[in-house]
Structure formats: structure tokens, C-alpha cells
Image (cartoon, grey):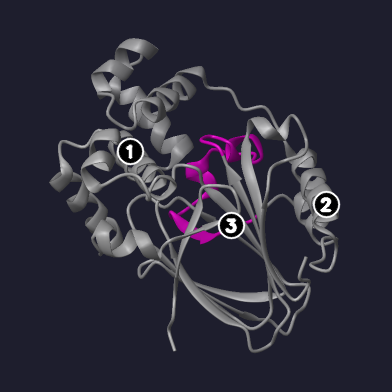
Amino acid sequence: MNQTNYLITHKPKNELLKKYISYYYFHVSTEENHSEAFYFYPNYMHALTIYKGNDVEIDSEQKTSKVRTSADKDKLTFLYCINLKDKIHVDLQGTFHKIGIVFYPLGLNHFIDKPINEFLSGSFQKVLMNNTFEQHIRTLKKEQPIEEQIDILENALMAVMRPFENKVLQRAVREIVLSNGTVKVETLEDITFTSRKTLLRLFKKHLYATIEEYKKMVMFRNSLNYALQHKEFVNLTDIALYSMYYDQSHFIRHFKSITEETPKTLLPQIVQIGNEDLYWHFIDEK
């Protein structure tokens, strides 16, 4: 592994954590003149991002984050992003140590002591984590082997894990994901034996999204994943049909409303990171 710069994804090792976390990623630079920028796009699997030794500036309105080397080498910043409908711009300059924990739907809820709508005041912001979790993370160093970093990260997660159980919401989310976002709210009411009003309250409380916002996010993300995983073999019509859009035009309009570009223009520029569904569009801002 190149200890100067690396970007590595890795599955959880702990069997219990595998139920709630899809993967981790470790993004590092030790070069003072390093510069990179990229966009990332909506995903129903949300990430807790940890920066060590960096100053992080967030603009929630413009959907941007700027990361710079901090004079405080021990500075910790925790970010959580529920990206419903926009591309988000990340600008990294200098040295940085970035750790991402990508949760399955409702995964983070098992590691915080309050509902999401009390944990967050916005969909893209810095957050406060449990002191126990923070103390574990402070022992994590970018020079350590990845396996050692994972062990520290998982010890931190296990130290703050708590039960979260809401069968109605879990069933509704599962149906939305399985239907690729096309399931009707009336159907969710029927299969969960729960009213629309109660379902909406649960989504806002524990997912910080309305039902329709969540459905659209799932549809967009699954179409993006499918397009990128099969780009050598499919055309836009295939993608639209697979993703259950009305037609190709519907898919293109939805895609462009989020990315500000057409699929034909943007898809060839997006890069898959590691073996997971981590897709970034790196941009040259020189």
C-alpha cells in the first residue's frame, strides 16, 4: 500500500456490524501540495465521515465542503450527510485523513442515542458523536495498517452500539428499496398496517426525509449503480426500463435535475472506488 496517498474500501470484519454497515473507506494524503476535488451523488446508504487533523468548512446551501490541513493535528470533525437530491462538491487540499462509514438504511440509528431528527438540524452538517466513540477514534492514525485502523474503528462502533427496533419503518424501507422506489404509499400502509400520517412521521423522525423524497433517492441511486456497473452492455433505454422510470426521457430528466448533466455526458466520467458502490466524479479545478 502507498502510505503517501491511498483510497481503500473495506467490508466490516465484525459479524454484528455487518448487519448495519455496508463498508468503510480510508482516504489519505500526506503531501502538503496535494489537491483534488470531486462530486458525490444521492445515496440511500448514508455515510458518517471522520476527518482527523483537518479544518472543514461546510456550506449547506451551496452543498460544498472545503478541507484543509489544520494547525491542530489532533482535531476531529464528524460529518453526516443525508443527500436527498443534489450533487455535493468536496475540495481537498494538503494533507488529510478521512474515514467513511457507509451505513445500510437505518444503520446509523443503532449508534446514536436519539432519533435522527434530533441528532441533525440539517441534511449536510457537522455532528457531535458520543465521547466514548471520539476517544477511540483519537487513537486511530493514518500510518497504521488498514487492518489495525479497522479494528480501532470497530471497537469504537461496538462501544456505542445500542438497540434500535422499529418493525414498521424497517418493513417500509425494505419495500421501497426492493421496489426500486416505485411502491405506492397506499401499499406501504397496507403491508405495515400503518396510516400514511404515522409512516410520514416515522420517516421524518428516523430518516430525516419524506416518503416521496426517499423513494426518488432510491430510484436515482439504483439507476446510477446499474448504469455504472453495466456501462459496457446497456443503453439509456435499458437503464430506464431496469430502474422502472416511465421511459428514457423520464430517466434523463431526473438524472439531469440532480447532476446538472445528461447521463451520456456524465456517466463516462464517474469513477468507482474500490469494489463497493462508491462512485465519485473527480474534477480538475486548476
SS under mark 3:
loop
Name the image quarter holding residue 29. bottom right
Residue 5, numbered circle: none
Residue beneath disc 2: 147
Relative to 68, is 169 above or below? Answer: above
Alpha-carbon distance for marks 1 and 3? 21 Å
Relative to 121, is 190 above or below? Answer: above
Seen as rendered, the residue at the extreme front is 233
Residue beneath disc 1: 210
Alpha-carbon distance for marks 3 and 2? 26 Å
Q: Earlier in the sequence, mark 3 or mark 2?
A: 3
Q: Which residues are magenta?
A: 104-128
Are circles 3 and 2 on residues that touch, CB within 8 Å? no
At horizontal 38% and vertical 45% (from top left) the residue drawn is 221
Residue beneath disc 3: 127
Q: Amino acid at mark 2?
A: Glu
Relative to 18, is 251 above or below? Answer: below
The percent position of residue 35, horizontal first and vertical second, equals: 57, 82
At horizontal 33% and vertical 38% (from top left) the residue drawn is 210
